[in-house]
Amino acid sequence: LNKQTDSLNWPQSPKLIFTSNSHIYDDLVKFYIASKVDQGSFYFIGQHGGGPHHAINFQTEHELDSCDRYLSPGVGNNYHPKIADVGQFFSRQWNHDIDGGGLLIQLAVPRYAFCAFSTSQASDYLKYQDEQLQFFKLLNSSVRKLFTVRLTNSPEGDYNTRQMWPVYFPDVTIDNGKESIYPLFSKSRLIICTYAGTTYNQTIAANAPTVIFWNPKDNQLHETTNLIFEELKRVGIFHDTPESAAAHVNAIWGDVDAWWTSAEVQEVVQQYSKLYCNLKVNSLDRIETEMRDLISH
């Protein structure tokens, strides 16, 4: 790794290093960052995924321990002194189709637990699968046939998600997760998010109609999220059972936009956006300010 790092055409004495994902998956980047931080470089991490949403997340805890600044897309993740709000910097806007179909976004996890992380892992995933099937079963048949199930293009262990869906719903439309999700977003009147992660930050930031559901016993969130998720639940965006989520989708399907654009729902959407996916600020300016401020000291 040392020889490979030395052979790269990368800065030998960077003042600052910024990454959002490579420090997780790329061992060469990890080695480069560690060696340069040892030499005095500043280290910035941009939020990825749902960020510090989880009650327990070893990865986020390690990042906060090791970085100089953790850049967050809103003011909600303010419980650690290294976290800085710079607004939403990993999303984009699109126009959703008010007459389009539905999009059910699925989680895939390895067969064995891999991290201290308060989300569905290992055999808990079997319960997650059951809840997904229950939700889909409870949709009205006229609604269900308009849905696409989006799988993740990642290792699934031995849980056979791709084989499971056609067994229970032979006519289901499956997206294998290999292509960009944004064309699916733009074709959907309603997006269903089923785990705490990146997706609903992106869809809510884009003000696209979104329903979230998961079992709170398996997806435990940080205590700082309690109030806003109670508000999301009050207006029908968040549900803690597949039965509640399916009943709500059936009820609003005829005019999803009438529900989503109502004053009550939009007020909560704007509250959530300010906390976790704020597009109403100039993120580039804020990122630059945070970087210059640290370097100047």
Image (spheres, rainbow, N blue to C red):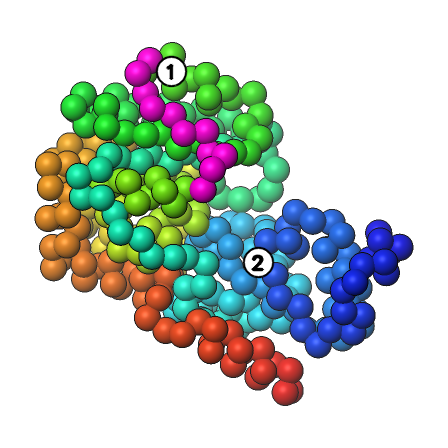
Which residue sits at x=52%, y=81%? 289
Q: Is residue 76 above or below residue 163?
A: below
Q: Amino acid at mark 2?
A: Ser
Which residue sits at x=40%, y=74%? 282
> In which image quadrant can residue 175 be found?
top left
From where the camera sits, is residue 27 visible?
yes
Q: Position of residue 184 (x, y in %)?
A: 35, 39
From where the camera sits, is residue 223 visible?
no
Q: Name the element at disc 2.
A: loop
Q: Residue furthest right?
A: 3
Q: Is residue 17 left or right of residue 154?
A: right
Q: Which mark is residue 166?
A: 1
Q: Is residue 71 above or below residue 26?
A: below
Query: What span is colored magenta in the figure?
Result: 170-180
Q: Main secondary structure of the magenta part?
A: loop
Q: Is residue 162 left or right of residue 5?
A: left
Which residue sits at x=25%, y=47%? 96
Nearer to me, 111 or 7: 7
Q: Amino acid at mark 1?
A: Pro
Q: Is residue 279 above or below residue 1?
A: below
Q: Name the element at disc 1.
A: helix
**Which quarter of the rendering shows the C terminus?**
bottom right
Residue 75 within the segment the image draws in magenta = no
Q: Position of residue 131 (x, y in %)?
A: 34, 27
Nearer to me, 21 or 130: 21
Q: Which residue is mark 2?
A: 20
Q: Position of residue 31 (x, y in %)?
A: 77, 56
Q: Position of residue 265 (x, y in %)?
A: 17, 55
